[in-house]
Amino acid sequence: MRHVFETREPGVLGAGPTLGIVEPARAPFTLARVPPAPELADLVDWHWVVTWDLPPGVRFTQAVVAHPVGQVVAERQGLLAYAMPAVSTDRRVLVGTDGVVGSKLRPGAYRALLGLDGPGERGAVGPFGGRAAGAVGRSAIDRALAGDAEGAVAAVTPLLADVAARTRTERSTAALATLREAFAAIADAAPGTTVATLAEELRTTPRSLQRLFAQWVGVSPKWVLQRHRVHRAAELLGRDPGLDLAGLAAAVGYYDQAHFTGDFVRAVGTTPGEYARRCATALAPPGTVAAGSAGRA
């Protein structure tokens, strides 16, 4: 396997994307991403391995702006399947020394992998993988804490592949292929892209596209378009808090800054200007005063 990227120091800004991680420069953990094995590539976008080592008594809450997908995560209590979060910004409290090994599923793959009749209830969490899951999860975390991200992913891959072999169907394979095309188009969407123009590009109708998303993702194509733009904006501000906010809004696909600010606040919980200031503070060397964003919102 080949790492997509890895950061070995706290603060997860690195060569690769940190889409969704709020204020990544403040993150007190290391992060590695590993691509899935070929037999899981239709279901798993990537695997992520996070480890942390905090001083006694220290607690850190990390916020993540939710993606419209499910996850399978190896934790101390075993393997857990997480549906798409019910809240815009998910939070996890980190304490002590530990780690988790997650598999970020592709859009619609939560339903496919769990063999469900629908996208699943948002915010649902449940056991995954049967009786072998506990040992698999502990092995993955132990390897992660030893610094072996690829070994951690290798520990969970056979169980994921075994479940997938039992739950994958022709219908789910076709739906996931269509969703991959749709999400790729969203990632490349030009400013002003609407559900109608997206459907036209995908050679379908808006109604059919909305039905596909409702049945397999659990949110609308419009929701996904908005969330992708916010993810991009937060990622860019996390790396360069001095960006002009009006220019940033246009760059990620908004015609006006007011709509950009509204979507950003609903997803992240703060305005782009305040987020930029917080990121600037996190990036500033100790003892210096961080410069704010060139634009305010």
Image (cartoon, rainbow, N blue to C red):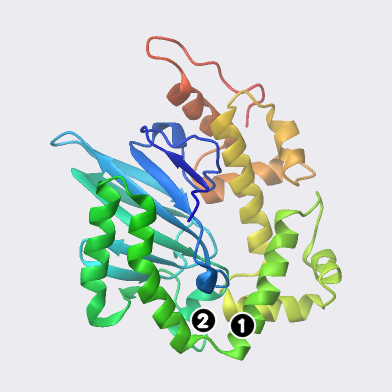
In-image side of 73 versus 94 (left or right): right
In percent of the image, x 66 and y 69: which residue is there? 180
Residue wearing tag 1: 173
Asked whether residue 124 is in view, the answer is: no
Secondary-structure class at tag 1 = helix
In percent of the image, x 64 and y 70: which residue is there? 220
In the image, residue 279 lies at what x, y percent?
Answer: 49, 29
Mark 1 neighbour density, 10 Å: few (under 14) some (14–19) many (20 or more): some
Quadrant position of the C terminus in the picture: top right
Task: Report how far apart the C-alphas of labels 1 and 2 lie in the structure.
Answer: 8 Å
Secondary-structure class at tag 2 = helix
In-image side of 260 versus 278 (left or right): right
Q: Are marks 1 and 2 in contact (CB under 8 Å)?
A: yes
The label nearer to you, 1 versus 2, is 1
Q: Is residue 224 above or below residue 243?
A: below
Residue wearing tag 2: 112
In the image, residue 19 lies at what x, y percent?
Answer: 54, 47
Q: Amino acid at mark 2?
A: Ala
